[in-house]
Amino acid sequence: MSATQTEAQPAGRPPLWRRLVGFNLLTAVLLGIGGYYLGWFAGHHIHAASLGFFADTDQNDVSLFLGYVLGVVGFLVGLGFANYPLSRLLGKPASLREKETEGVGRYFGLCTDHKVVGMQYFVGIGIFFFFAGLNAMLIRFELLRPEPNVWPAGNYLTLVGLHGTMMRGMMTSGILGPFANYLVPLMIGARRMAFPRIESLTFWLLMAAGVILTTTIFFGGFPTGWTGYQPLNDQAQAGMDSYIVFFALVGLSMMLLGLNMLATVITLRAPGLTWTRLPMFVWGVISTAVLMLLAAPVLIGVLSMAALDRTAQTSYFVASAGGSSYLFQNLFWVFGHPEVYILALPGFGIVLELLPVFARKPLWGYRLAVAGFLGVSLLSWTVWQHHIFVSGINSDLRPFYMLSTELISIPTGFTFLCAMGTLWRGRIRFTVPMLFCLGWVFNFLFGGLSGIFLSDVPSDVTSHGSFFSMAHFHYTIMGGLIFTFFAAIYYWLPKMTGLMLNELLGKVHFWMMFVAFNSTFAPLFALGFMGMPRRVVTYPSNLQALNVWVSASAFVLGLSMLVFLVNLVYSMLFARVPAPANPWGSKSLEFQLPSPVPVHNFDRIPVITGDPYGYGEDTTVIGAPALVPAGE
Amino acid sequence: MVISESALPPPPVYERADMGARALKLSGIAAAVALVGVAIGLYITEFLMSGPPATSPPVRVSAQTKSVRLTIQTVAAVGPSLSAHPDWVSYLVRHQGKWVRSTIWTVPAHALVHVTVYQFDGKSGLRNPFMSRVRGTIGSTMTVDGKTLGVINPDDASHTFAIPQLHLIVPLKGVADEAKNQCGYAPCSLSNAHLTIRFTFRTPGKGRYRWQCFVPCAAGWIYGFGGPMQTLGYMDGFLNVV
Amino acid sequence: MTRLGDFGRIAVIWLVTSTVGMVLVATVLAPHLPPGGASTEASGQRFDNEVLTLVSVPIVAMIVVYFGYVLIAFREREPSVLADGPPIRGHMRTQTIWIVVTTLTVLFLAAFGTYELLGGSGGGQGPNPAFVPAAQTTAAGVKREPLQVQVIGQQWQFTFRYPSFGGFETAQLVLPVDRQIELHVTSLDVIHSFWAYKLGVKADANPGVDNIAYVTPKHLGSFDLRCAELCGLFHGYMFDTGRVVSGADFAKWVAGQRAFMQPVLKYLPPFEHSYLPEPTIRGG
């Protein structure tokens, strides 16, 4: 992805080279590299006694951290993020010029149009999603045989870590990034997000983070998996630094994204859009955004401590020097458990948003569904120690964490009940997005139930740290988040691009993915029950048959992703079937706008007179009379 | 509510849908696929498959049994000629008359392996003194400069040669701190101060067995176990029993 | 059948499938559920797994049967016309029943899990275990202290110390059958996790922490033990085989090990519940 991909310019515009000069991705990459080397150089010349790098180790973490941080600063300056604050500091008038940029160039820089940011997220996250998925394929390739034979042991751990960390980090914004940024203003009748520059910043921070994590392969990788437990983290090679910087940047991006979403929904709703008329997708976004805003700072904090341990020789996590390995585990999971629901909740929102459209019925139990989302959001703060049930901490608190964890299944159950009620006596249409939503129902059912095993302390002693827990969270995250992610793509991409996706290829994609997904992860429950631990490069030979089955299914699962890619390229570049404004007959506000959506969204801010689920009702739907004159 | 076709806005018109554009798109996709393919290829070959090379010491077959002679040395600093990390501590193995940095050794099954270790590194001490007892070798002993020993003082240990799956542990005594003519960068010659340690063990059935050092000898890392201790090709390796 | 209506039919199919499913689970699947019955703790965990699987069956059956039925019965039969279904926006009684039933199920599961936890259930509980199993008594009715065994994790091997036998250390785990064991799990470097799958024991080894887990082996034979927490390069190789032997064999083995390890005994540090080796701090 670089600025040189811009297409031939229409007549009347400045020549290509002229347009490449300025605050754009090209400048940003150059300044980013420059910043990195500046930090790297500075790091090699710090001679403070406590910071000096230990010559024998060939490993200068100070210079790496400085390099990464200055690299990110340079990257952001190059994109133009410093322009606005600087001009305000100098007393110059505020400018909203970023919004006016047109043409392909605006996708390669700071753009305050939320629709551009949504598309940027879609492509940017997609790239890293496929890279992380490739790593999963390579992991399964190794596990075809019980003895290590393909990737050396250390590189295998890096593969595992890269897959997990990148998926967790990038796909946290997998739905909020592309879809919430694009759709929330449209759904609430606004022209923009509350903080448009911050919105763009969240995207570019994430891209910088992704590149930084990828550079770990030049520094030996990292051995800790996505959890980064201490003190292995302190002990690890230089590649660990990219994990720390990556996750901290992701945390920053998440925090700002959550803040922006909350502020937007609270302040920019159109007249008449009361809280009980909000689309369920927006409720999903809000309940996620609260978690993002409050959980991510904990992550940034704990990673800062890890960074200090690795550079300034503090010892937060080194027991022999007065630290504690539990400190990292606790802080990490205080973030980590809400993070799990950050991944799941937008999916809940999408399912309940789409089911009414394709069952042609109002959402059943709106208030219950909202209560479910908020309940999950709230309860997710109280459960983190179930990740460390056998760690030896607070054994007397185990009944509490068991109870609080199992309580979460009550609000989660609300989502199921509302989905069931919505389908009842509906006129169900099996479109591709609908299929993915139904896939969610099936997958999340098993994901949720297996979670009960892991929350029950005696059962957890068997399953903790085994393939069972790995299968569990793949059922909830891949089966929950990724399935709804694709539902969202098939449902909203026609609105976002103005082009329909091919339905036949979409169905092939769904069925291939659904079957291969279950065929991959269901046997992992059995493998875990048979005693196979996570993250191992070798395993007992009696488990080989199942592992080969799983690997073969995983490859088919990977192929199904390629089917999607083919569909995307074919539909967007070759077929180019124009999408009608409302291809699904939805009553939601965003589908009342033309496709593609005009730059300023609404000529007049609409007055909302009902929720978007009035199927089969005579009441006037939302967005009908555009009475209020447009005003910022 | 029924939405009829006429209620929809007219489809937008797109330009440049002619055959030339199609060829352009196809070649663009081909280029992108090729680029991604090359990137994946480089990722897999240059990063993922990078590891120490394997060596196989020559096998001698006598009437009763197969045997292998394995000659290795441990060095405090591997030197710029053998590694990009010249200051890392490492094992080296003699392969066709030369010292090479390879820690994956192929040996036959159910054979005797006669190991000779030239110990050039100094003392650093065991973390778990339990490891100072020789076990798993023939007779549960080793010879140090010709003297048969079953145990050493754990503070004198410089490294261990251990294959935990075979319950084989041999503590390797370090060169005295005051010894003259200590080896700087590897490969070290036998004129440098060193100890010669010999022991013999029997290989099990076919399989892949890891071996490692248990002395926290990677100075500079927390618990002395980073860098060369966690990178294949220095203080860790595999015994391929075929 | 027509008298039943949609809801009645779903209920009947659900009743039948979940009954059949529960019978199948109880008879066919349950004996194969992990971790088996090699120890008191393992049996307890298997019982939990059985109960949870049994409870899951009607839930899975309900969702699958409901969705299966609804998707077939209420599918759009004329896709060319965009027609809406009846505008039902909720049903108070259904919602109330659902909330009550799920809450009761969850509370039952939590109470059940807590009750099962009372014996310790084989998990690591830290230096001050809250859930201690009932002490064993000898034939004469005298309380028998559990046998202490220390598990020491280090990169990348577990070693074991037997403080009641002079504190000797060994690389093999051998346990006497029918004897309550008090495992003290600790680490010399990073976090490991001691997992004896068959015995139903899992306890993290944290540096500087004494993590106590209880287990009473019930059958003679060997068992696999391995590390269940990512601990670096050779994590995948941190496994070994332990043995459960009779009391007499155990005494014999202890005598042999003590003799073999005698020369190194004077070098071992005095027995403690955790050891804090010097970290070589980077930049040191």
Image: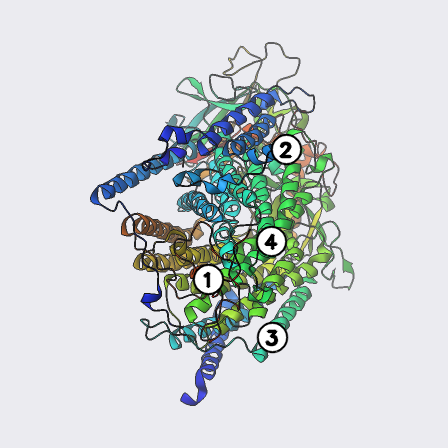
Instruction: Identify the element where label 4 is drawn.
Output: helix
Kindly identify the amino acid type of the residue bearing the numbered disc 4: Leu
Taking depth in this image into account, of B230 and C159 the one nearest to the observer is: B230
- The disc numbered 3 marks a residue on which chain? C
Q: CA distance from mark 2 to mark 3?
A: 60 Å
Q: Chain of mark 4?
A: A
- In screen coordinates, is B147 left or right of B111? right
- Residue mark closest to the camera, 3 vs 4: 4
Judge depth for marks 2 and 3 and give the one in front: 2
Secondary element under disc 3, as helix, strand or loop, is helix
Q: What chain letter is assigned to the residue under label 1?
A: A
Mark 2 neighbour class, 10 Å CA radius: few under 14, some 14 to 19, many 20 or more: few
Callout 4: few (<14), some (14-19), or many (20+) C-alpha neighbours within 10 Å? many
Label 3: which residue? C101
Q: Position of residue A288 (x, y in %)?
A: 58, 55
Q: In the image, is residue A250 above or below residue B91?
A: below
Q: CA distance from mark 3 to mark 4?
A: 34 Å
Same chain for mark 4 and mark 1? The answer is yes
Instruction: Report the front residue among C231 and A304.
Output: A304
**Chain of the residue under label 2:** A
Q: Residue furthest left?
A: B19
Instruction: State how far apart marks 1 and 2 are (Cα).
Output: 49 Å
Q: Please name whichever residue, B169 or A431, is drawn nearer the observer in this view of the structure.
A: A431
Frontmost of labels 4 and 1 is 4
> Given contact means CB atoms under 8 Å apart, are the residues at marks 4 and 1 in contact?
no
What numbered label is drawn on residue B87? none
Q: Which mark is residue A89?
A: 2
Quadrant containing the N terminus of chain A is: top left
Which label is found at residue A262? 4
